[in-house]
Each structure stands twice: as C-alpha cells, then as structure tokens.
Amino acid sequence: MAGEDREGDLLLTGGHCIPESELVEQASRSGGPGGQHVNTSSTRVTLRWNLRETCGLRPEARARALERLARRLTRDGELVIHADRHRSRHRNRQDARERLRLLVEAALVVQTPRRPTRPTRASKTRRLDAKRRHGDTKQRRVVRTDDD
C-alpha cells in the first residue's frame, strides 16, 4: 500500500518510507494569468528531497533510485518537484507529494533481464522451405544454352 501515514511520512510500495522530516516544502507565487489571486497568494509548492542522504530507503534501493533519477537530481543529490497546477496551496502540496511518490516508486522497480527467445523447429523448417522454393523459382528463370 502506498500513500501517507498519520505523521505525514510518504509510504511507498515495497516497505519503503520517505520520512516527513526529509521533505522540504517551500511556497511561492505562481505565475500565469489569474488576476488578483495569483498576484497575492503563494500557492505554488516546491518540494525537495535529498535522495543521496535519505535514510528511508535501503542502500540497494537508494543506489537504484540514484542511477535511474540521475538526470532529475541537483548537484547536491536533491530531487526537486514544482507543483502549480491547482489554485490552492493544499492541493499543490498533495500533487507534489503524489508526483514524488510515483517517481520514486517507478525508479525502485527491479527490471527483470530479458531472456532471448529461440526460433521453434517449425519456424526453422518454414524458413528453409521458403528459401528452397525461392531458389527453385530463380533456377527456373535461368536460360540454358547448349554451347558445347
């Protein structure tokens, strides 16, 4: 199960948890059209989480997440998410936390290695028969001249 527990910690699938104390939230004014409300209220939420120094993930999971999320991290190893889709700070906060949860869960998925498949006996036979038929067709097109 994933979501939030009572203390505000972010619960991830697989028994991982991002403690509330590791999340840094900052509110700022959101841009774009909207008139007086947008100009006066800080509804945009910026959520920061230091992935490199977290204690909420096991070491192997942290290494996997660092590798997969490397392009999204700052130099200090922080994952930064900006949320300004909604008009209220509360909904933007929920949106940012949900996006963080989805990103980290996707990064923690262990991908099973691909096992190469082999052609079946029937497919080998079909391929060889087709090659033989094609060769026979080309052989029939050859004009034979008796120059001897």
Image: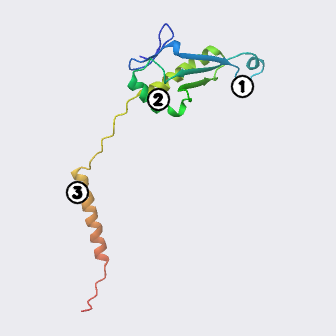
The answer to whether residue 73 is left or right of residue 109 is right
- Could you give the CA–CA distance between mark 1 and mark 2, rounded to whole angstroms? 31 Å
Element under disc 2: helix
Q: In the rendering, at what x and y percent does residue 54 appear? A: 47, 19
Label 3 packing within 10 angstroms: few (<14), some (14-19), many (20+)? few
Residue wearing tag 1: 31
Q: Are marks 2 and 3 in contact (CB under 8 Å)?
A: no
- Could you give the CA–CA distance between mark 2 and mark 3, rounded to whole angstroms? 48 Å
Quadrant for the C terminus in the image: bottom left
Q: Indicate the amino acid at tag 2.
A: Leu
- Could you give the CA–CA distance between mark 3 and mark 1, rounded to whole angstroms? 66 Å
Quadrant for the N terminus in the image: top left
Q: Is residue 133 above or below residue 2?
A: below
Question: Does label 1 or label 2 sit earlier along the sequence?
Answer: 1
Q: What residue sits 39% from the left and 17% below the top? A: 15
Which mark is on residue 66?
A: 2
Question: Does label 3 or label 1 sit earlier along the sequence?
Answer: 1
Q: Is residue 120 above or below residue 2?
A: below
Q: Nearer the viewer, residue 24 or 116?
A: 24
Label 1 packing within 10 angstroms: few (<14), some (14-19), many (20+)? few
Front disc: 1 or 2 = 2
Q: Indicate the amino acid at tag 1.
A: Gly
Q: In the rendering, at what x and y percent does residue 35 appear? A: 77, 21
Q: In the rendering, at what x and y percent does residue 98 appear? A: 52, 20
Q: Indicate the amino acid at tag 3.
A: Thr
Residue wearing tag 3: 125
Q: Are marks 3 and 1 in contact (CB under 8 Å)?
A: no
